[in-house]
C-alpha cells in the first residue's frame, strides 16, 4: 500500500483519488472548498479542507515520507506552481502536477515538479492519432522516437504467421504480444508460428516512423 496525496478536487482530482483508493492505497485529499471535501470524504482515506497556496498548512498536513503528491488544482498557474514549490520545500520526492498550458509546463519544471501531465493536450493528441490511424487502439509513447502501440491487424496480415510477415525485417518493428479480443487474454512474445486472426490485436514496439509505415 502506498501513500498518496491529491490536491485539488476538480473532476481530475476526484476521479484519481477514488481510483487510487479503490486500488487499496491510502489517499489523502486536500481542497479549500468545504463542499467538495464533504462530498468525497467517505470515498477516500482522509479528506482535509486546506489552501494549497498556504506553505504552513502544506507543511503541517504533508510529510516527506509521502510516496507521491498529485497537484490538480484548477485555480490557474499560480496556485499549482506555489503548491509545487512548497511541496519540494517540505521534502516530497515525487510531485506530479497537472498543467494548463505550455508556459505552465516550463514554470513547473523550473520549480521542481518531477512529472507534469497536460490532460487537455494529451487527449487532443491521442484523439488526432486515433482519427488519422483508424486501426489504432492504444498508444504508449516511450521516447520522442519510440512507442508501444496496440492496433487491430491490417487485413493483409490476417491468416499469416509472424514468421511469414517478418515485421522486423519489413518494418523494423517487433510484436511483443498478441491480445485475444474475445477473451481479453494475452500471448506474450508470440512465436514465429503464431497466426494472425481477425479477433486479435497486435501490441508492437518500434520507431514511430516505422509504425506509421504499416498499412493501417
Image (spheres, rainbow, N blue to C red):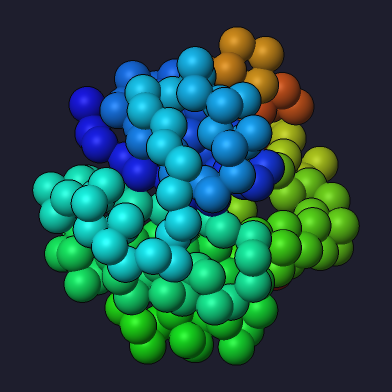
Q: Is residue 142 left or right of residue 63?
A: right
Question: Which residue is pictured at 27% across the width and 62% down the height?
Answer: 56
Q: Is residue 152 above or below residue 114?
A: above
Question: Which residue is pictured at 60% across the width and 11% down the height?
Answer: 183
Would you identify the image quadrant in which residue 22 lies?
top left
Q: Quadrant of the N terminus?
A: top left
The image shows residue 63 at horizontal and vertical percentages of 17, 50
Q: Is residue 20 left or right of residue 154?
A: left
Q: Is residue 110 visible?
A: yes
Question: Which residue is pictured at 31% across the width and 26% down the height?
Answer: 25
Q: Is residue 74 above or below residue 153?
A: below
The image shows residue 205 at horizontal and vertical percentages of 48, 56
Q: Is residue 174 left or right of residue 35?
A: left
The image shows residue 206 at horizontal and vertical percentages of 49, 64
Camera-side residue of 163 and 105: 105
Question: Which residue is pictured at 42% across the width and 75% down the height?
Answer: 82
The image shows residue 133 at horizontal and vertical percentages of 80, 58
Camera-side residue of 142 and 119: 119
Q: Is residue 203 above or below residue 39?
A: below
Q: Quadrant of the C terminus?
A: bottom right
Work out which residue is located at the far top of the displayed protein and give it.
Answer: 183
Camera-side residue of 22 and 212: 22
Q: Is residue 183 left or right of residue 65?
A: right
Q: Is residue 208 visible?
A: no
Amino acid at each position: 500500500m502506498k501513500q498518496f496525496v491529491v490536491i485539488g478536487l476538480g473532476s481530475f482530482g476526484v476521479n484519481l483519488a477514488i481510483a487510487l483508493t479503490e486500488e487499496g492505497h491510502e489517499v489523502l485529499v486536500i481542497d479549500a472548498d468545504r463542499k467538495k471535501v464533504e462530498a468525497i470524504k467517505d470515498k477516500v482515506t482522509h479528506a482535509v479542507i486546506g489552501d494549497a497556496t498556504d506553505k504552513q498548512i502544506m507543511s503541517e498536513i504533508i510529510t516527506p515520507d509521502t510516496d507521491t503528491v498529485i497537484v490538480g488544482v484548477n485555480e490557474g498557474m499560480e496556485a499549482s506552481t506555489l503548491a509545487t514549490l512548497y511541496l519540494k520545500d517540505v521534502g516530497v520526492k515525487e510531485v506530479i502536477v497537472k498543467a494548463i498550458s505550455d508556459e505552465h509546463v516550463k514554470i513547473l519544471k523550473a520549480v521542481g515538479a518531477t512529472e507534469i501531465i497536460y490532460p487537455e493536450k494529451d487527449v487532443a493528441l491521442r484523439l488526432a492519432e486515433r482519427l488519422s490511424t483508424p486501426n489504432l487502439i492504444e498508444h504508449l509513447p516511450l521516447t520522442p522516437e519510440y512507442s508501444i502501440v496496440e492496433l487491430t491487424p491490417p487485413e493483409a496480415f490476417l491468416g499469416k504467421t509472424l514468421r511469414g510477415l517478418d515485421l522486423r525485417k519489413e518494418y523494423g518493428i517487433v510484436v511483443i504480444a498478441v491480445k485475444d479480443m474475445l477473451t481479453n487474454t494475452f500471448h506474450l512474445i508470440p512465436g514465429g508460428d503464431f497466426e494472425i486472426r481477425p479477433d486479435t490485436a497486435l501490441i508492437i514496439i518500434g520507431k514511430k516512423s516505422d509504425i506509421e509505415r504499416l498499412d493501417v
